[in-house]
């Protein structure tokens, strides 16, 4: 992956992306997919702290934040646990328990680390958003899965595959699922409108703090005049 810096006023870089996370032969190759839709990187990145939408939009439940949202300059971290139901082998539904850590650097780079306890699987998802023309945004999803040596009992079928193939097969599934989840969000993002002042509630949790965090990525005058986006 190659990244570049661009600023409307020609400013030089004021912060830098992190080093790549550790990898090795126990991690699958990177797989990617691209989506283009009406939106903005600030909105797509807001999902990292919008805990409430995980249930209403994606069907997760028992979504619980772990600790508080951390903000250190251009870096933001949020952690949460949740459960999801996956259908395995036709009518069999399996409850999957997941822990997630989201690392946000600016408005265009997010890395989410997942640990799926039921499957016994670690995976990574990069969410990379780039504005195209003031209306459209292009989001690149990049996934990677770690070697699965002891699949959970509901995923015992993976044991029939060589260890070296399991994470590669699951990486294809993970990327397909994440693309489906983003398309569920797109339905909302494409129907949003500007609203100032924003109508937030206590249920929005750290969304307000995230929007304050986002102000640092706009030139000073633009930041003062920029209204807040809200989906309807």
Image (cartoon, rainbow, N blue to C red):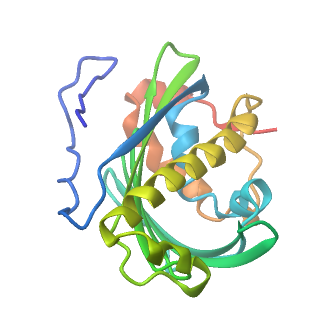
Task: Locate residue 190: give its quadrant.
Answer: top right
The quadrant of the rendering that contains the C terminus is top right
Asked if residue 65 shows in the view, the reply is no
Question: On the picture, is 185 further left or further right than 169?
Answer: right
Who is closer to the viewer here, 173 or 104? 173
At horizontal 54% and vertical 75% (from top left) the residue drawn is 157
Residue at 65% over, 65% down = 205
Q: Is residue 27 visible?
A: yes
The answer to which quarter of the image holds residue 198 is top right
- How many labels, in total? 0
Would you identify the image quadrant in which residue 179 lies?
A: top right
At horizontal 27% and vertical 62% (from top left) the residue drawn is 27
**Left or right: where 31 falls relative to 214:** left
Residue 59 lies, with reference to residue 186, above or below; the image says below
Q: Depth check: give the residue in front, 182 or 120.
A: 120
Q: Residue at position x 71%, y 77% from top? A: 94
Residue 207, given in percent of the width and then of the height, sits at 61, 56
Q: Is residue 88 above or below residue 229?
A: below
From the top left corner, tell me how far across and down residue 74 is, in percent. Answer: 32, 50
Residue 38, image x and y in percent?
63, 23
Which of the two residues, 188 or 134, is positioned nearer the viewer here?
188
Between 190 and 33, the one nearer to me in the picture: 33
View extreme (top): residue: 133
In the rendered view of the protein, which quadrant contains the N terminus?
top left
Q: Is residue 117 above or below residue 27?
A: below
Left or right: where does residue 191 sit relative to residue 143?
Answer: right
């Amino acid at each position: 992956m190659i990244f570049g810096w661009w600023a409307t006023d020609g400013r030089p870089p004021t912060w830098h992306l992190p080093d790549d996370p550790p990898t090795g032969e126990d991690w699958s190759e990177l797989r990617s997919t691209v989506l283009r839709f009406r939106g903005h990187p600030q909105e797509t990145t807001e999902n990292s702290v919008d805990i409430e939408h995980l249930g209403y939009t994606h069907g997760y439940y028992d979504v619980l934040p772990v600790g508080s949202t951390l903000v250190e300059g251009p870096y933001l971290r949020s952690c949460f646990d949740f459960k999801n139901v996956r259908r395995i082998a036709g009518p069999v539904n399996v409850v999957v328990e997941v822990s997630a850590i989201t690392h946000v650097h600016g408005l265009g780079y997010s890395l989410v680390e997942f640990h799926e306890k039921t499957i016994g699987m670690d995976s990574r998802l990069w969410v990379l958003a780039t504005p195209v023309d003031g209306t459209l945004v292009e989001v690149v999803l990049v996934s990677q899965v770690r070697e699965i040596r002891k699949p959970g009992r509901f995923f015992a079928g993976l044991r029939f595959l060589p260890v070296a193939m399991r994470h590669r097969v699951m990486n294809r599934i993970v990327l397909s699922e994440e693309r489906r989840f983003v398309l569920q969000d797109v339905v909302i993002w494409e129907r949003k409108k500007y609203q100032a002042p924003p109508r937030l509630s206590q249920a929005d949790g750290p969304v307000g703090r995230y929007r304050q965090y986002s102000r640092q990525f706009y030139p000073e005058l633009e930041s003062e005049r920029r209204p807040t986006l809200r989906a309807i």
